[in-house]
Amino acid sequence: MSSIAVELPSIDVPSPPAWPLIGHLPELATQQLDWVARTQGRLGDVFAARAGPQRIVMLSHPDHVRHVLVERRDVYTKGGTFWSAVRSLIGLGLPTSEGQTWRSRRRMMNPEFRRTRVAQMGDAMARTLADQFATWPAQPAAFDVARGVSRAAMAVIVQTMFGTGLTPEQSDEVGDALSFSLDHMLHKVVTDALPAWLPVPGRRAHQRAVARIDAVLYDLIAQRRAEGPSDDLLSMLLEMRDTDGSGLDDEALRDETMSLFLAGYETTAASVSWGIARLAADPTLYAPLVEEVDGVLGDRAPTAADVPALQATTRFFFETLRLDGPVYWLPRTAAQDDVIDGFRIEEGTMVALMLDRIHRHPSAWVEPDRFDPDRFLPERHAGRSPTAWIPFGAGQRQCIGKGFAVMEGTFLLAMLVQRFRFELLDDTRLVPQIGLTRRPRYGVKVRVVPRR
Ligand code: HEM
C-alpha cells in the first residue's frame, strides 16, 4: 500500500441535484449512460452520482486511467460493494482477488495466455466456430444473431478450456442463468448497501442461477479429471504450481474456472453481436471486410497466422469495442485519501472509470460518436493517448485474455462475413442492457442471408 500522504484541497466533487434517499437512481435506471454523458457535459470530467446509498465518483478523462490504474494502483483497490457483488458469482478468481493471491495466480496463469500458446488454440477455435455456424438457418429468416454468437463463443471457451462441448440446451441454460446474474449484480451494488434484513428481490433467483452454472462447470471439471490431462486450459489449471509447489484446491479451481468462463465468453459475444448490429444497420461497412476476408481467406478457415493480414476486420472489432464495448466502466474503491484532477477523493469512496465516456473523449477522438474503424489505422492511431482506448483495462490488472479475445473477435467477424450478410428487420430493436456488462437487451434479430 502506498503511504504517500495527500493533503486534500477544498474542491468537492460536483454532483447534480439528487432525490432524497434514492439519489440519481431514477435517472440512472431510465437514461443510463445517456445521463452520464449529459452530466459530464454539464459538470465536467469528474462528478459524483448517487445510486441509492452508494455514492460513485465518475471519471471520464483518459488521464484518469493512468492515475487510477497505473500511478496510484495501490490506492484504488477492488474493495467495496461492486466487487463484492462480482465475488458472489465468481468467488476469488483472478479478476476479483488481490495482493499476494492475485500476484501468484497471475504469475502462474500468464504463460498459458502468451501469444504463442494462444496461437496454438487457433485451429480448435476456428473448427468450433465453423461447427456452430453450420447450424445457423439456411433460410433468410429472422434470427437472433446475439444468441447464435453467444452459443458460438461459449462453445469456444468450453472447447479450449475443457476440451469438450455443451449441448445447445446446456449452452442456453448457462447463458440465460449468466445473463440473469450479470444484470442482478448491478442491483446488488445498491442493495448490498441496504440493511441485510431487508428482503431484496432477485437474491434467491441469483443464488439459483449460480447453482445452475456451477452444476454445469463441476460436471465439466469432473469429466476432465476422469479423462486425465489434455491440451486445454482446465488441465493447465489442474497442473498449475506456485513457486512453493502448491496447486489450486477445489474451491480455487471452481472460482478460476468460473472467472475464465464468465470473462471469456460473455464479453466477446456481446462485442461481436454489437458489431453485427452495426453491419446490419449500415451496409457500407461491409465492403472493406468482404474484400479483405475473400482475399485473405477465400473459403478456407482462418488460422492464428492470418490475424495480422485481417487488419480491416481487427480494426472493425476495435471500433466496436470503443463504442459498444461490454465493459463500460471499471469501478475501484479508494483505500486512502487522494486527489484526482484537483478534486478531493476521501478514503472509502467508490470511483469508476467510465469507459463509455473515455472512449469518446474529445481530447483523443474526432467525431467521437461516429463508427469509423479506420481510426485504428496506424497513422491515425499514433500520438493518441495510450489510455484513450482501454476496453481491456490498463496497468497490471489488464485483461489476461486480450490476445485470445482479439483472435476470437477477428475470427468470429471474419467467419461470419465469409458466410452471411445481415439485414435489419422492420422490428429489429437495438437497445443496450446495462448490467454488469453492456449487451443487446433484445438480442440482435436480423435476416441472415447466406453468401455462398
Ligand atoms: C472482448 C473481450 C474481452 C473484454 C472486453 C475484456 C475486458 C476485460 C477488462 C476491462 C479487464 C480488467 C478488469 C479490471 O481492471 O477491473 C479484464 C480482466 C480479465 N479478463 Fe478480460 N476481457 C475480454 C476477454 C477475455 C477472455 C477471452 C478471457 C479469458 C479467456 C478474459 C479473462 C480475464 C481475466 C482472467 C481478467 C482478470 C485479470 C487480472 O485481474 O489479473 N477476458 N478483462
Image (spheres, rainbow, N blue to C red):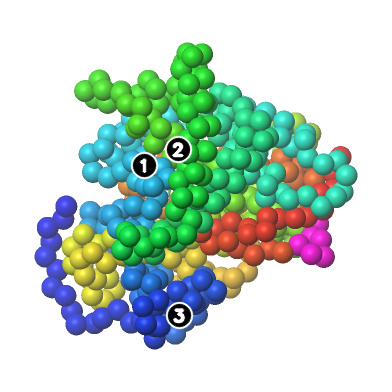
Residue 440 is situated, as x and y percent measured from the top left of the image, at 63, 58
Is residue 152 among the parts visible in the rendering? yes
Q: What label sits on residue 6 in the rendered view?
A: none
Image height check: is 409 above or below 368? above
Residue 75 is situated, as x and y percent measured from the top left of the image, at 22, 58
Residue 196 is situated, as x and y percent measured from the top left of the image, at 32, 59
Compare marks 2 and 3 and give the one earlier in the sequence. Answer: 3
Is disc 2 in contact with disc 3, using a CB cutoff of under 8 Å?
Answer: no
Mark 2 within 8 Å of ligand 1, using the beta carbon = no
Q: Residues within 10 Å of mark 3 (few under 14, many from 20)?
A: some
Question: Is label 1 or label 3 in front?
Answer: 1
- Quadrant housing residue 39: bottom left
Is residue 375 among the parts visible in the rendering? no
SS at badge 1: loop
Residue in the image at 56% along x and 50% along y: 179
Residue 449 is situated, as x and y percent measured from the top left of the image, at 85, 48
Q: Which residue is mark 3?
A: 39
Is disc 1 in contact with disc 2, using a CB cutoff of under 8 Å?
Answer: yes
SS at badge 2: helix
The type of residue carrying mark 1 is Gly
Q: Residues within 10 Å of mark 2 (few under 14, many from 20)?
A: many
Image height check: is 118 above or below 38? above
Which one is nearer the viewer's eye here, 423 or 444?
A: 444
Q: Which residue is mark 2?
A: 258
For the C terminus, the quadrant is top right
Residue in the image at 46% along x and 50% along y: 204
Magenta stretch: give its range: 423-428
Q: CA distance from mark 2 to mark 3?
A: 36 Å
Compare marks 1 and 3 and give the one earlier in the sequence. Answer: 3
Q: Which residue is mark 1?
A: 91
Q: Residues within 10 Å of mark 1 (few under 14, many from 20)?
A: many
